[in-house]
Image (cartoon, rainbow, N blue to C red):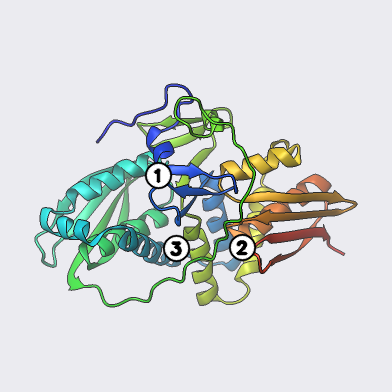
Amino acid sequence: MPKVRLCSECGASRRIVREHRWLSDGTIVQTKNPDHRMIFIENENINGIFRNIEDIICMPIERIIVEAKRRATFDFVDHILPDVVKAVVQRVGVRPATRNRAARGKVMGYGNIELANLRRVRDEGDYVTIRTEGIYSLPLFCGDLAGSFNAIDRREVAVSHREVAPDVHEITGHISVHPMELMDRLKPIPYTHKPGDIELEKCPKCGGPKALSDYRWDTERGMILHRETGRRMVMLGPSTVDTIIEELQGELGESIPEVVIEAQRRFVRSDFYSLDEARTVEDFRRALALRGLGNLREMEWGTDRLRLRLENPCLFLPMVGLVLGIFELATGKEGRPEWEIREDGDLVVEVTPKP
């Protein structure tokens, strides 16, 4: 496994800084593919949303998460990987590509990921097994593994997993001899990119946001941890979560938006976050921008009222739940949210007390 290089000044992964750009409009994009948006977010928040959704609807959603992530990963890898690279992989094998994705996953905060075994002789017995320790999300990683091999190997993949020790899993992709059937393309998430004026202070050494010095890259465990709180962070595409929410709504019905908002509200009310992190509008604006969640243009507190306008938003429904949770933490009252995505793409949320 290649050595993870860290900035000698701020301690951030040099690969993360090299491959991503924090823009003045409150977004993070990939350097080589500026159309692909990313977020830097608390891992427990993502898992907490999924966990609370299951509690609310009283059914597991792992199958839906895996399938949505598989389709999203297939679309991304198939789009970004040139045909000549696909041809090379077909000729020389997928082992180098698998190891590269494992190395990349470690600096993204996905956990300790290693290629355990691989068989590829083009028959029904082909498989790949990945050993993970402290994986950031089992269903998301399973979907990522399946989608990657769909795009690279052009064959159907079924994924299984088993826990071999506490927090240690072996995840196996069983690669069929059958080529993939034509699948519907995912509709791209319509994220906006209005110009902004956010200036995050930069590290003089690597050029990444200086605020990344608040986090520690644990290169052995493949984790990104806040130095004071210990919160675990991950880098991932917001379309992953937004696509899963769309898939949930398509399969389970029109009540899913309210379920997602409630799931996030419950997570915020669990005391994971502190109101001190949004002491001022500017503090909150910079916190959202560091995470790539958008450009906070307005945040107004009135008598029993909180109104927020966010340019270039993503994770639309979790953001509504976040604002609702902040209102309830600050006022001690149950809130009622009203929200809309305007024609220009802005997210506007207003919370008032329940009657």
Left or right for 54, reference 147: right
Give the secondary structure at mark 1.
loop
| Crowd tier of the residue under label 1, counting other residues whose Cα lies within 10 Å: few below 14, some 14–19, many 20 or above | many
Task: Write down the quadrant of residue 260 in the picture.
Answer: bottom right
Nearer to us in this view, 62 or 203 = 203
Name the residue at 53% across, 58% down: 50
Left or right for 74, reference 61: left
Give the secondary structure at mark 2.
helix
Q: Position of residue 152 (x, y in %)?
A: 24, 60
| Crowd tier of the residue under label 2, counting other residues whose Cα lies within 10 Å: few below 14, some 14–19, many 20 or above | many
Mark 1 and mark 2 lie on one chain; the one further toward the N terminus is 1
Q: CA distance from mark 3 to mark 1?
A: 16 Å
Give the secondary structure at mark 3.
helix
Q: Amino acid at mark 2?
A: Val
Name the residue at 90% across, 52% down: 303
Left or right for 281, reference 202: right
Read off the residue under disc 3: 65
| Crowd tier of the residue under label 3, counting other residues whose Cα lies within 10 Å: few below 14, some 14–19, many 20 or above | many
Circles 3, 1 touching at the beta carbon (< 8 Å) = no
Q: CA distance from mark 2 to mark 3?
A: 14 Å
Nearer to us in this view, 177 or 296 = 296
Read off the residue under disc 1: 110
Q: CA distance from mark 1 to mark 2?
A: 23 Å
Q: Give the residue furthest to the left.
A: 121
Read off the residue under disc 2: 260
